[in-house]
Image (cartoon, rainbow, N blue to C red):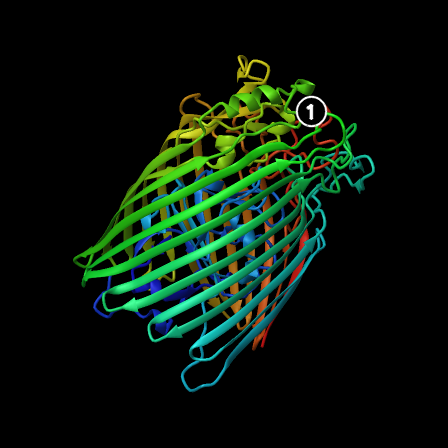
Amino acid sequence: MQRFKTKRQSNINCILSPSDLASCLMSAFPLYAAADHLDLPSIQVSAERIYEPGILPINTSDTAKLLDDEPGISFYRGGGVSSLPVIHGLADDRIRIKVDGMDLISSCANHMNPPLSYIDPVNVGEIKVFAGITPVSAGGDSIAGTIQVNSKAPEFAEAGKGLLVNGQVNTFYRSNNNARGVNLSASVANESVYMRYTGSSVEADNYRAGNAFKKAGWAAAGRGWLDADEVGSTAYKSINHALAFGVQHENHLLEFKLGLQNIPYQGFPNQRMDMLGNEQKRVNLRYLGQFDWGMLEARAYYEDVDHFMNFGADKQLIYMTAVNGMPMYSASKTTGVNLKADIDLSASDLLRIGALYQHYTLNDWWPPSGTGGMSPGTFENIKDGERDRLGVFAEWEARFGKQWTTQLGARLERVSSDAGNVQGYNPTTNGMNSYQQRDAAAFNALDRQRNDNNVDLTALARYTPSTTTDIEFGVARKVRSPNLYERYTWSTWTMAAVMNNFVGDGNGYIGNPDLKPETAYTASATFDFHAPDRRWEVKATPFYTHVEDYIDAVQWTAASNTPTATPISNQFVVLKYMNQSARLYGLDLSGHMPLASTSLGEFGLKGLLNYTRGENRDTGGNLYNIMPLNLKLSLTQQMGGWNNAIEFVSVQTKDDVSSIRNEIHTPGYNLTHLRASYTWNKVRVDFGVENLFDKFYYLPLGGAYVGQGTTMSSTATPYGIAVPGMGRSFYAGLNLKF
């Protein structure tokens, strides 16, 4: 559970080694030292895990996967560096994700470039997760929670000690998909100025499942051969560069960060197309100052994204007269300003206030290809899309005696969105029974401006009756406005609709300008029993969320442009986004304990159990992509420089599936992983085995397998195959500090 940090605690870096969740080394950065008169205890509101900066988690290149050991967290699987985290059954844009304080947005009809894909794992200094009852100061326009990812904090030399120079090199290899990469970071600083560079490159081939799940053969005409156990469209390459500059003077810090990402290709086994180019450029300016009255933080940022999709190496390129596949482009720009102040009202009261403004623009267009149905003009999926957020918040945290701490917050946001007129490939006809002219005319006739006034409210409390017990509970009202793809994608044509799919279920989706914002009411509590020194602890968190105007979908018939009268089953379908009612509830259990201290080292046990249930209250059906009951147990051993673990993962059968989406059932499975690392001086070696016994299994949240062949042909793309998980993989990595 995340310690919600007061002004004093927000100035402390808690560094947690990935191999040891039980220990936490606390160190204060002088610039951030808080006023001595304020000493509020922290409120536990969600899971937090803060990683040792620069230590590469070599069993993954996906930053989202750093949260794999957190209660209540699961993942929609997609590309090798682009998983979508899920908090208590709610995913993607329902989570507010901040990277170095920037609210980033996925600018892709398939959400292939989510915010966490823009920071490499080696550049992560800390991750904080606010699940469910999220303080209003941690972000709005979301209903599931907030994930904050920050790169390494600035380091300055001590006064009179000259220059502080640090650097490290990481390299790794993973056998199953031939993944290999290298990472470099270097920094130099005196007592007032610092500069840091971080760069990374990773490349991988398709991965293999634990067994055959299809026939071996040519991926598509003119394309390569795929073995029966090879999962098509899972290869990727990613390159990241980041520069950071900082100046500090007394109690003031000014930081300037530049970032550049280039992904030449990233396959998606659960999407009809692949990412064949993604370039992101970002600029981030931050001021942090400590004053007698409290602390002030200001940030301004800018992001520019150019994104390209087409058929990758394992998918059919040419259809009839199409000469270059189906090229799809999207381009976005995001400008944001954030202000936040922590004000000391008294020795036991703290007030947080803040404001934000964000301006986001998006164009999504598909150039013509050949002389058939994808010609002669450009298909405008979203033209001149805009989404602006303007928000303010206030949050009061108070202590009552030695046992009670409370927090009350309110946030108001105005979210405005709009989009321009559109057209199909041929604006004068409804060729190929695609209804492009009809649908475009109907869309263009609408007043598409939408303004949502959203109010978030939270109330949290922490009760500490003894040194071994903490009880935390709270309620929240959270609101999220639809994204541009949910509101403004307009074509009922199957080929266009299947290009607008965030969830990887093989279906097509149509936007709905009349969607209302989702409003979630959440109640949760955490019962935390632990030793006085936290050598052992057990936590239980039950939660319940009711969502009004939940954005689900209904099957849609293009010919009549109405809901499908009789639902279609056992095949891919086209759906339209609709507001409905939903509820989610469940339980997270987690804990750790020492087992024995022997001549062979210190042995310990860690455990994690998650259960989530999601229901559509209008239809009586199940919500899509809800992770089934799952359990993880880790037996750890530490001796000298050694940190070792054997991990057992058990996932139950996924039977509670969304019938309206024809979601695929997946059987249960059990996996075993081995992990080891050895550290001495400035060298660390990691090695291990994922899926030790090479078990075959399907990913419960991996979606439908459409990773090879004629993915745009409804008859040639088989329905009913889930995306398999990775088979056995050996890995090794080396980290050198200098």
Indicate the quadrant containing the C terminus: top left, top right, bottom left or bottom right.
Answer: bottom right
Local packing at callout 1 (Cα closer than 10 Å; few below 14, some 14-19, many 20+) is: some
Q: Which residue is drawn at 62% across and 70% down?
A: 169
User: In the rendered picture of this protein, how many numbered marks are placed on residues?
Assistant: 1
Location of residue 517 by image quarter: top left
Q: Tell me where residue 197 appears, x and y as whole percent.
A: 56, 68
- Which residue appears farthest toward the right when viewing the image? 222
Q: Tell me where residue 56 appears, x and y as whole percent.
A: 57, 62
Q: Which residue is drawn at 68% across and 20% down?
A: 431
Q: Tell me where residue 61 appears, x and y as whole percent.
A: 60, 55
- Which residue appears farthest toward the bottom when viewing the image? 160
Indicate left or right for 314 with 408 as reference: right
Whether residue 117 is visible here, answered yes or no, is yes
Give above or below for 216 relative to 404: above
Front-most of residues 212 and 548:
548
Whether residue 500 is visible here, answered yes or no, is no
Indicate left or right for 333 with 365 as reference: left
Looking at the rendered structure, the secondary structure element under dot 1 is loop
Q: Residue at x 54, y 33 (%)?
A: 654
Give above or below for 78 relative to 567: below
Q: Which residue is drawn at 83% across and 38% down?
A: 222
Q: Tell me where residue 613 appears, x and y as whole percent.
A: 44, 33
Amino acid type at image mark 1: Ser
Q: Mark 1 points at which residue?
A: 714
Front-most of residues 496 and 655:
496
Indicate left or right for 254 with 666 as reference: left
